[in-house]
Image (cartoon, rainbow, N blue to C red):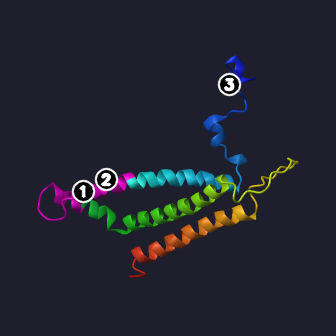
Amino acid sequence: MSSEGGGKARNRRGLSGWLNPYHYNFERWAYVFQRVTGIAILAYVIGHLGDTSFFVGGPIGTGPSQSSWTFISGIVENSFGHLILVLVVLVVIFHGTNGLRLIASEMGLILGRPASIEYPYKPRSLRLGQRALIWAAIILAVVGAAWAAMILFGGLA
């Protein structure tokens, strides 16, 4: 069935094809996490702009600024708030380093040469360099999150 007659082409799965996890490889999972971490960073930035707007008046006084300051400080300055910040560090470092890999891949700097398709098909882009860069992004993110956790939870001053 073609799309010329007004019907939907069978090879276009839309969002349901994007959500099908059974045909994903390591590189594709890294790309999915790139999208998810991008949304998480956007949510954090919007929330951060909202909570910093409460701090404009400072803790001085007894008006609405004081109650907002106390409320937001109670949310941020505890173990749960510190855990959220550790996760933010993890997400930002992974997103940034994996984004550099995606940029290099998009520019063709780390892709292999085109070859004829032979069964079983193995993507040429998943060479050792691509996998190493994905693992580097994961390792850097975990090390950065561990460092942030040591700072926020009192291990380093």
Q: Residue furthest right?
A: 118
Is label 2 in contact with label 1 (beta carbons under 8 Å)? yes
- Residue 8 is labelled as 3
Q: Amino acid at mark 2?
A: Gly
Q: Looking at the picture, which amino acid does disc 1 mark?
A: Phe
- Whichever of callouts 3 and 2 sits on the residue coming sooner in the sequence is 3
Q: Nearer the viewer, residue 110 or 39?
A: 110
Kindly indicate whether the residue at mark 1 contacts the one at mark 3 (C-beta within 8 angstroms).
no
At 50% across and 73% down in the image, what residue appears?
Answer: 146
Location of residue 127 by image quarter: bottom right
Tell me the SS state at disc 1. loop
Q: Main secondary structure of the magenta part?
A: helix
C-alpha separation, residue under disc 2 versus residue under disc 1: 7 Å
User: Residue 142: x and y, percent?
Assistant: 55, 69
Q: CA distance from mark 3 to mark 1?
A: 50 Å
Q: Is residue 51 magenta?
A: yes
Q: Which residues are magenta?
A: 46-70
CA–CA distance in space, label 3 to label 2: 43 Å
Secondary element at tag 2:
helix
Provide residue 74's location: percent of width, then percent of height. 28, 64
In the rendered image, the quadrant that contains the C terminus is bottom left
What x and y, as percent, mark residue 152? 40, 74
Residue at figure coordinates x 60%, y 65% from the top left: 137
Q: Give the mark nearest the N terminus, 3 or 1.
A: 3
Which residue type carries mark 3? Lys
**Residue at point 18% right, 65% down?**
59
Q: Residue at label 2?
A: 50
Establish if 111 lies above or below 154: above
In-front residue for pair 90/56: 56
Rendered image: mark on residue 54: 1
Secondary structure, mark 3, is: loop
